[in-house]
Amino acid sequence: MNYKIAVLPGDGIGPEIIQQAIKVLKAVGTKFNHRFEFSEAPVGAAAIKSTGSPYPDETHKLCMESDAVLFGAIGDPKYDNDPKAKVRPEQGLLAMRKKLGLYANIRPVTTFKSLIHKSPLRPDLVEGADFVVVRELTGGIYFGEPRGRSEDGLTAYDTCVYHKEEVQRIVKLGFEYASRRNRRLTVVDKANVLATSRLWRETVQEMAPEYKDIEVDYMFVDNAAMQIIQWPKKFDVMVTENMFGDILSDEASVITGSLGLLPSASVGIHTSVFEPIHGSYPQAAGKDIANPLATVLSAAMLLEVSLKLTAEAEAIRQAVSRSMDAGIVTEDISEGKAFRTSEVGDWLAGHL
Ligand code: IPM
Ligand code: MG
């Protein structure tokens, strides 16, 4: 089969890690007889530099016309300490999510045996932890209006807004993930304080009877933050609003031993986007040292979720496991000799 994949490398280490995922996808294409057509487009700080916009119309058009989007990373320290900057790279990511209608971000948290000792948690707490964070991605305080500054500049405000349908569609996805897994759904909110959270809770309570075989529990976000590090194994599927999901998924990812290993999928109305959950790691940009595995595993999610190529996705996951067993990994997770980003990509492609 022929598939069109839009490639948005973005900033920092984005281009070099994306390169490895492309190598791996090409190898999968050869092995399984598929043709992947890759088209590259700018996003983030790189796009501001070349076009003035962090998510140019041309890039959006390419995404809309593709079967899936492979995304690197976004962000540039130049903007982080400049609160007055008019355009910011992150606006590109948010605009992309909104325009593609990507209301759900799926972040699987899995542990790898060979990495358990790198976890900041005790091995007995973390070994075998395996859950999915389903984060709402196009609503809440990230997008609510009004937002801004008062005339005198002394007051700033953001608004957290959720409509019932937005809650229903993400919660439905949460239930569906839970039915395919261990049938436990944890709803994370702050219903003791926030009206939006009470809408979430009410909506889940209305929907729960349709999913009788799923055990639902509700947890305030502060408690959830604590339980993730105390009993990470108790979670199966966690569904939550945009900002809570942003924070908790970062927390969840580090307990596995490396941020450099976790992929994600953003799905919704139009083309789905697949990206590593780590950021643009500007200190490492261009040095050929960044861990490409989260991006390679994101490519596996792309094959499975968007193109329905399950065996192909599994082949990538196996190759990644083998590379870790064989110690063909970058410096962040290596025990002995550290391999370069490009060497890991070559090894994976060769192995496939
Ligand atoms: C993420 C990132 C983004 C977010 C930033 C870069 C805007 O942290 O994908 O989790 O907050 O959603
Ligand atoms: Mg984040």
Image (cartoon, rainbow, N blue to C red):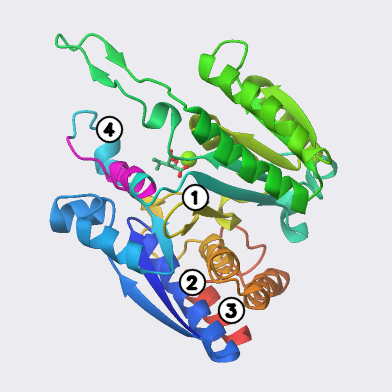
Q: Distance between the residues labelled 4 and 3?
A: 38 Å
Please name the residue shown 80% across and 44% down the image.
183
**Which is nearer the eye, 194 or 229?**
194
The disc at residue 21 is 2
**Which is nearer the eye, 125 or 200?**
200
Instruction: Name which residue type carries label 3.
Output: Leu
- Overall secondary structure of the magenta stretch? helix
Dots 4 and 1: beta carbons under 8 Å? no
Q: Distance between the residues labelled 2 and 4?
A: 31 Å
The residues colored magenta run 86-97
Q: Is residue 98 left or right of residue 21?
A: left
Q: Name the residue under label 4.
A: 81
Instruction: Name which residue type carries label 1.
Output: His
Magenta run includes residue 36 = no
Where residue 114 sits, quadrant-wise, is: bottom right
Q: How far apart are marks 4 and 1 (CA)?
A: 20 Å
Label 4 Cα crowd, 10 Å radius (few <14 / some 14-19 / many 20+): few
Please name the residue shown 74% across and 32% down the image.
208
Q: Where is residue 10 in the image (x, y as percent from the top left)?
A: 33, 58
Q: CB at mark 1 closer than 8 A to ligand 2?
A: no
Instruction: Name which residue type carries label 2.
Output: Ala
Label 1 Cα crowd, 10 Å radius (few <14 / some 14-19 / many 20+): many
Q: Which of marks 4 and 1 is nearer the N terminus?
A: 4
Q: How far apart are marks 2 and 3 (CA)?
A: 9 Å
Image quadrant of ligand 1?
Answer: top left
Q: Earlier in the sequence, mark 1 or mark 2?
A: 2
